[in-house]
Image (spheres, rainbow, N blue to C red):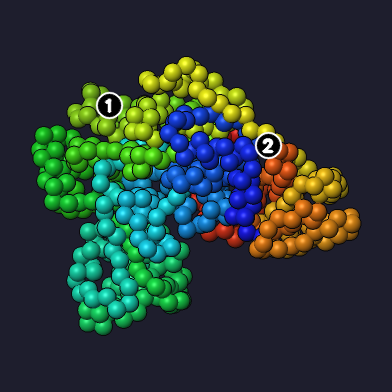
């Protein structure tokens, strides 16, 4: 069955219908919810159903990636995007990876200037780790136009090469990594950061004759592509103004010449983003790109608050230590504070001042004393949702079968979600062996009196007695994390470099 149908069933019942009504109004700009972690994607879907652009904030990148996949099943993957954070600190003399930057700029572009294609159309939900929420970015990134071509377009080879170079793509002999391009005769190979495979553009004179994807391993062409859509690979582009400012900065502060000389010469230097506050006019936050009626949903706010505190402290310490070394033990020669992480309280105050809403979902009651901002009057409203987390069976299949039969007999709509078709089919067979009516289906509605088994990305289930709905997942039954077991199957959960700042016990 479609998990979107599941979301509609849940959201049509109280208290979720009431939450959607609250979201449509302007009265509850701050609201604290208490409920199990399994409700996270459904609560975000509630806000989407209310017609609000939603920014969901998680404590870590891994949680953001997994939640984006789950939300895709509920509201459609074409309207959901993950906004990744840098792997580096704002003041570190290291540049973020080109694929990270490309994904970030693609999301910003879709927020400010959505296209008509499924891959660049308007977004309803953006999922971001708190690190992305707190970090200022160069203002105007959403206005950076990607290099875009479709078959039949006209563009000279020189103009295409110049456009890719201006977008911070590196010219190489053989394309192997994202953010690179190569030219051979009338053929231009480009590896956009947002694509799974690089693209080969064949020109006949100035006409785009064909666009195909190709394999990095053997450089052989694969399938035809509809278009080339290549967002920039740097968040600080070397415009004439940036180069002039870098040259002047080097003259005023000779200790920065190693970095500023390269920037002034038009060379993308490693770590040049650390000087962004003095090379551009203004910085802004991610929330500044959202509509003024947008909703922010902060998940597990206590962990988010702790994570935000650690990030701010680490960044400040690194800034002080790096500049002390660069200035020979003295003070920082220039002020780069505009690029520092903001505190979570400051961001929340900014959000409320913009007229946006700040909702939280916590598994426990939330102490709001440390989260108050000017404009708060007394205790913020809070709602405890009646749903409870699905039992963790840890491989006890017999108990899982018994619970599924009990819920079915009690008139609940019962759904079991597995990430793969094979395990889902096996569960149907096991239910049949226990004389429990069950069926495997990809589309349709949930019926009372039969256990529906389907495939999807939900990692945890829940039981809602008020909505008469019970959901369990393969992870609930087996006790094994689907996110690691299915990493090879789901592109959105592709393996990535681990951020040491996000390592916790048990990761």
Residue 186 percent location from the top left of the image: 26, 79
Image quarter hosting the N terminus: bottom right
Residue that protrudes farthest toward the bottom in the picture: 204
Residue found at x 82% / y 45%: 410
Residue 383 visible in image: yes
Which residue is at the front of the view, 130 or 44?
Answer: 44
Res 158 quadrant in image: bottom left
What residue is shown with label 1?
324
Residue 250 percent location from the top left of the image: 14, 39
Judged from the image, the secondary structure of the residue bearing numbered disc 1 is: helix
Residue found at x 44% / y 39%: 295
Left or right: 27 in relation to 247: right
Residue 345 percent location from the top left of the image: 40, 25
What residue is shown with label 2?
387
Residue 312 visible in image: no
Judged from the image, the secondary structure of the residue bearing numbered disc 2 is: loop
Residue found at x 24% / y 40%: 276
Residue 490 percent location from the top left of the image: 57, 58
Q: Residues within 10 Å of mark 2 (few under 14, many from 20)?
A: many
């Amino acid at each position: 069955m479609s998990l979107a149908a599941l979301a509609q069933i849940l959201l049509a019942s109280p208290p979720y219908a009431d939450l959607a009504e609250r979201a449509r109004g302007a009265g509850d700009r701050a609201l604290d919810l208490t409920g199990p972690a399994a409700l996270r994607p459904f609560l975000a879907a509630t806000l989407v159903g209310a017609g609000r652009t939603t920014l969901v904030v998680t404590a870590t990148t891994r949680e953001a990636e997994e939640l984006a996949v789950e939300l895709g099943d509920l509201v459609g993957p074409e309207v959901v995007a993950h906004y990744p954070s840098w792997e580096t600190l704002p003041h570190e003399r290291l540049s973020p990876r080109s694929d990270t930057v490309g994904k970030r700029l693609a999301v910003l572009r879709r927020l400010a200037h959505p296209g008509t294609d499924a891959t660049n159309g308007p977004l309803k939900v953006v999922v971001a780790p708190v690190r992305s929420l707190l970090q200022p970015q160069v203002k105007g990134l959403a206005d950076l136009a990607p290099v875009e071509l479709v078959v039949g377009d006209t563009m000279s080879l020189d103009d295409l090469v110049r456009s890719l170079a201006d977008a911070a793509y590196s010219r190489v002999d053989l394309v192997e990594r994202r953010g690179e391009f190569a030219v051979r005769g009338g053929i231009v190979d480009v590896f956009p950061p947002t694509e799974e495979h690089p693209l080969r553009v064949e020109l006949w004179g100035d006409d785009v004759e064909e666009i195909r994807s190709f394999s990095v391993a053997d450089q052989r062409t694969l399938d035809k592509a509809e278009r080339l859509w290549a967002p920039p690979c740097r968040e600080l582009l070397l415009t004439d103004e940036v180069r002039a400012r870098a040259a002047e900065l080097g003259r005023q502060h000779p200790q920065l010449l190693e970095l500023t000389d390269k920037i002034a010469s038009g060379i993308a230097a490693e770590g040049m983003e650390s000087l962004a506050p003095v090379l551009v006019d203004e910085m802004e936050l991610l929330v500044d790109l959202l509509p003024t009626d947008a909703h922010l949903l902060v998940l597990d706010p206590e962990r988010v608050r702790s994570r935000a505190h650690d990030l701010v402290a680490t960044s400040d310490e690194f800034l002080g230590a790096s500049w002390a070394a660069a200035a020979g033990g003295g003070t920082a020669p220039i002020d780069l504070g505009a690029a520092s992480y903001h505190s979570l309280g400051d961001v929340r105050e900014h959000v409320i001042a913009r007229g946006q809403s700040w909702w939280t979902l916590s598994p426990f009651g939330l102490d709001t004393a440390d989260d108050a901002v000017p404009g708060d009057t007394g205790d913020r409203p809070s709602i405890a949702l009646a749903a409870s987390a699905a039992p963790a069976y840890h491989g006890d299949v017999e108990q899982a079968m018994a619970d599924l039969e009990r819920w079915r007999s009690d008139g609940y709509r019962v759904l079991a979600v597995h990430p793969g078709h094979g395990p889902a089919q096996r569960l149907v067979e096991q239910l049949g062996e226990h004389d429990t009516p069950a069926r495997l289906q990809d589309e349709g509605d949930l019926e009372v009196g039969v256990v529906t088994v389907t495939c999807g990305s939900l990692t945890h289930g829940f039981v809602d007695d008020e909505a008469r709905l019970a959901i369990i997942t393969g992870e609930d039954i087996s006790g094994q994390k689907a996110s690691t077991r299915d990493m090879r199957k789901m592109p959105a959960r592709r393996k990535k470099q681990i951020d040491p700042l996000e390592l916790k016990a048990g990761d």
